[in-house]
Structures are given as C-alpha cells and as structure tokens.
Amino acid sequence: MNNSEELKDLVRRKYAEIAQQDKATNASSCCGAGGCSTEVATIMSDDYTKLEGYNPDADLSLGCGLPTEFARIKPGDTVLDLGSGAGNDCFVARAATGADGRVIGVDFTPEMIVKAKENARKLDYQNVEFRQGDIEALPLSACMVDVVVSNCVLNLVPDKRQALSEVLRVLKPGGHFSISDVVLVGELPSAIQGAAEMYAGCVSGALQEDEYLGIIRDLGFDEITVQKRKPIVVPDDILSNYLSAEELADFKAGGTGIFSITVFARKSSVDCCGAEVGATPGQARSDKTGQARHDNADKAKDPEGIHAIPGCELGSACC
Ligand SMILES: C[S@@+](CC[C@H](N)C(=O)[O-])C[C@H]1O[C@@H](n2cnc3c(N)ncnc32)[C@H](O)[C@@H]1O
C-alpha cells in the first residue's frame, strides 16, 4: 500500500480527526467502550487512571502499553516521548522527573500538538514542551535525552530503522528507552495488510516481532529486554469489514498473533567518539576501545575502525 509520504498523510489525517473529536465521541466509537465500529485505534489501550501524573484530558485511549512503567525515570531526567499525541505519557513522565527534569513530546500531527500544549498550559508546567516533528528526523540535538518512551507509534512509521536510529542519536551515552508497540507473529491476510484503516489503527504497519527486535539489536543497543507482551484481539466485527466469513475463519485458525510488546534497551555508554559517560566534554577515554576524541572521530570515516564501537558503524553522532 502506498509510499511513505502517502502513509504519513493517512496517519496525520486520522490522528487530526481523533484530536478534534471530543472524548465521549472518541470513546463511544471504540470496541472497548461499548458499541463496536470500524475503529481499531482505541482497542489496545491500558488503564492509565491509577498512574501518578495521569491527566484525563491527555488520555485519548490511543496507547497499547504502559511504557513509563518500565522506563526507570529518575528525578531530574530529560525524557522524550515519540508520537506524544495529547501528552498522555508526558504527564506521567513529568510526575517521575519532577520540576527539575524536562519532558519533550514530539508528534507530527499539528492538532495533537495544539491539544497537548493546551493540556500543559492548564497544569502550568514549565518543563513539559511539545514539538511538531517527524520521528524519522527528530527535532532534537544529539545526546540530550536520558530516557525515550513511546506508546503505539513506531508501527505507524514507514521507516522504523530510521526512527530507532534517531532514538540512538538523541540518547545520551548510557541512556535508555522503554517503548510499547504492536508487532506480529505470522502473516496478516492481504485484505488487512492493504486496508488504510488497519494501518492507521496500528495493525497492518506492524513488523514481525523478530524483525523489530533485530533492528534494535543491529543498531547496537544493549540490555534489550521485552518487559511485557500481551496479545491483541481485534474483534470479529472489525475484521469482517475486510474478510469474508471463510477468510475470517481461516485467519483465526491460522495462528497469526498480534501482540503489544514493551521493550527496554540501553545505548552504549561509550559514544562514537570514544568519550565515556560522565567524562567532561572533550575528555579522552584511556581504555582499549577509547582513543582521543579526534582519533575516534577519524574512525567514523574508517569502516573498519568504527566497527569497534556498537552502533557507530551506522553513523551515530559523537556526543
Ligand atoms: C496511536 S497514537 C498514540 C499517541 C500517544 N502516544 C498515546 O499513547 O496517547 C500515534 C501518535 O503518533 C503520531 N505519529 C505517527 N507517526 C508519526 C511520525 N512519523 N512522527 C511523529 N509523530 C507520529 C500520531 O500523530 C499520533 O498522535
């Protein structure tokens, strides 16, 4: 289905519409909340209401996990939320960073940014900001973030490897992410793969679970752990919009799984210029992988040398 820009337009239009709906309309159009319809964007969400920092105005029931639960956010941390929507995870993260930390939400749907900013304004938070941007090209400098969180967004992004390499770029050495997302085990029927609603609804853009975890590994992240894995059941009345009764029965018997997984992973504490975590800027490492920063910067031009540091072969920035 479609090229990357068309997919992004489709997603932006869908989430602009959701941002402009009032909460009651949004909730009543989802299967989890009574009468079923064709909406799939809202059937996967977890209960946020007990979390510290929960802001009902920011909760549009669009997530598929609770990434902050495993994000190990500390007071004073800088946290980035990818695809922040109306700010649901940002306000929960703000409760963990406190007033001394900083929370940045990035989303490419202008209507979501307006809604999120309005939510932050009502709470008078000075350290929660929202930036409009594409997570394939994050509007942030390299190495400025302690923790990245994200809830049900990467499946919507055409180039997931590029988005995850942006995560690697903006994390500080030794920083980490906790990302909830949808993955597949087995193939979806072609009618579902090609359905725009199923793409915007976080199903058909999902990667195979092995491929998803493989990208994270290839990029050089450490400590990769699937913290939580839950099956997602798309109701029959939604599937039957795309499948005949026979196809539906085949699909259900076929064993394809749709899962929400929450993955933790850490960026190496050695950056591509060989600086160690906690070293003052410009300071050289003295162990065997470390060289003076300028030596390592030279390695970036040398495909052999750069392979010594995980992630650097993919062009990670120096911090
Ligand atoms: C399923 S919603 C999740 C929103 C939020 N994380 C939550 O849990 O409430 C997906 C969000 O990701 C945003 N999004 C999708 N693709 C994006 C991209 N390439 N760059 C930035 N934002 C994106 C959409 O605009 C939408 O707000």
Image: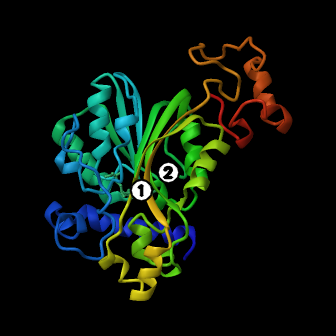
Read off the residue under disc 1: 108
Q: Is residue 167 above or below residue 297?
A: below
Q: Is mark 1 within 8 Å of ligand 1?
A: yes
**Which residue lies most toward the front here?**
253
**Residue 227 vs residue 166, the one in the foreground:** 227
Residue 271 vertical position relative to residue 284 in the rendered view, above or below: below
Q: Which amino acid lies under the numbered mark 2 shown in the image of this protein?
A: Ile
Label 2: which residue?
135
Q: Residue at x 62, y 49 (%)?
A: 215
* Placement of 315 over or under 243, stated as above or below: above
Q: Residues within 10 Å of mark 1 (few under 14, many from 20)?
A: many
Picture residue at 55% right of the left edge, 62% below the top: 158
- Say if mark 2 contacts mark 1, CB within 8 Å: yes
Quadrant in which the C terminus appears = top right
Q: Is mark 2 within 8 Å of ligand 1?
A: yes
- Residue 244 visible in this rendered orientation of the protein: no
**Percent x, y of residue 42:** 29, 62
